[in-house]
Amino acid sequence: MASTTQVLLPGDTIPTSALPTPNNPKKPLTLGPGLRHIPPSTIVASIAGSLSTDNKKNAAWVEYNSGRYTPSANDLVIATILTSTADTFNCTLTPHTPTTSLPHLSFENATRKTRPQLPPHSLVYARIVSAPRDSPVELTCVDPSTGKSEGLGPLKGGMLFPVSLGMARRLLAGKKGGVMVLEGLAEKMGFEVAVGRNGVVWVDGGSVKNTLGIGRALQEVDREGLGERGQRKVVERVLRGL
Amino acid sequence: MAPEVLLSPLHRADGSATYTQNGYSIIGAVNGPIEVLRKDELPSEATLEVHVRPAVGVGSPKERHLETLLTSTLRSIILTHHLPRTLIQLTLQVRSIPAEDAICGVSAYLTLLPHLINTSLLSLLSSSIPLRTTVTAALVVSPTSSPTMPLVMPTAQEILRAGRIKHAHVFAFDGERKMVVCESEGSFTFEEWEEAWEVAEDVCCRDGGVGLGEAMQVDGQSENLEGWLREVVRRKVEGEQRWKSGT
């Protein structure tokens, strides 16, 4: 992180000096969420947050952590099944938004004869195939190139815990995200976790007590914005309580 | 003088803000983009719904009028074309207004409007809905006793003490110093109106021609609303990123 964070308000023009300087000058500039391009060469912020840049990918985006989840392609999400039609499931990612479709055949080993039976309100860990602006979002649970599930599919048991969108991003970012509470807990107990970019974490710790302990620890780390030492304390407290 | 703000106090709304200034206290909440009713759906842009709820009693034509003004203003601020066929719902609940508001001699809708505009912008910022620019609003009141010295963002008591009011205006400016709202009442000449406009512009917008880098330094002690807005956003960013420096 730079020593001074550049705070952006909607409508602020990004000066050329703040844009990333690519190592490979031929690489086109990529604009992430919160930035828009006004031809010929003006880059304007549309969301309040801090400017982040990546020189390697020649990318710039606005870092923010509030608001509603907006689907984008290749995001991993936890969807809730609402209804099942002839060949798709209708799922929701966030409340009060149009449903997304998950074809019956986009599960591992699914054929016309052996399609998965998922009742309403069951959870699915899925990847967003496409999120066009003008048509419904489509989900899948298989990798199209291999036909394998790669960890995606129905989530059985466990509980859902809402977290902030930024926390979900951090959890999926691995080391860069700076969340070590799960690694710390995993040293002493076994559990399964699935992180959805739509701001939910699914936890199955074997028993309700363990599941709640893990989920609450994640939510506390998110709410308090804890660093490494604070997270270690949370881990100790959770392990002591078991 | 700068308004007190708390961003995202409501955890079930997508974005929210509480705003307190001069005894006017308002809570704003934004939900969106969400599914829109078929009859309100616009094929190529987002529908905006604004609800203003008074501190006491149920809504009246005054609130409906404020809603109309806010809807048309915010439509030009939000990038509605980025969210087609969705609904953005903004609810503004007035929590309290000063007791002198009803008798100070300026229409109640004029004294409330700038606070509503500022609150709705803060709620929209908190909900991370893409915006074209920011908007800040201020009230300017000219009493008959001292027509050369307009009162800017006065408290209701100050208006009451100033005696008879000759004219009052509400101006709102976007981030490029363009006027987006102008509501006036009373009798005034064009010169008087222009003077009020200039005074309001000074309060709302930061000094002209300031680049992004320089604007960073004015936050904190700045007098204008734009600088205040930057400070609010800086605190929001700090809160979101404290895990990076936290222990």
Image: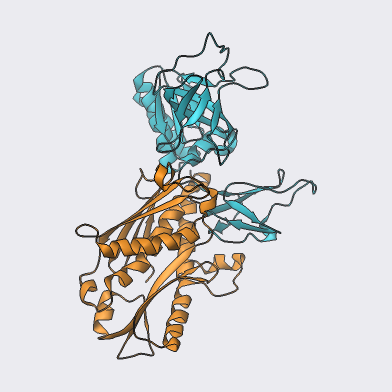
Observer-nearest of A137 and A159: A137
Instruction: Say whether residue A193 is visible.
Output: no
Q: Is residue A189 left or right of residue B63?
A: right
User: Where, by quadrant of the figure, is residue A138 drawn?
Assistant: top right
Q: Is residue B181 left or right of residue A59?
A: left
Q: Which chain is rendered orange in the image?
A: B
In percent of width and height, residue A233 lies at 42, 34
Q: Is B181 situated above or below B232? A: below
Instruction: Say whether residue A129 is visible.
Output: yes
Which coloring applies here? by chain
The residue shown at (54%, 75%) is: B207
- Image colour for chain A is cyan
Observer-nearest of A209 and B229: B229
State the residue lying farthest toward the top: A113
The residue shown at (58%, 18%) is: A149
Observer-nearest of A140 and B66: B66
State the residue lying farthest toward the front: B39
Tag count? 0
In percent of width and height, residue A199 lies at 46, 36
Q: Is B199 situated above or below A220? A: below
The residue shown at (55%, 55%) is: A46
The quarter in which the C terminus of chain A is drawn is top left
In percent of width and height, residue B244 lies at 53, 45
In percent of width and height, residue B172 lies at 44, 70
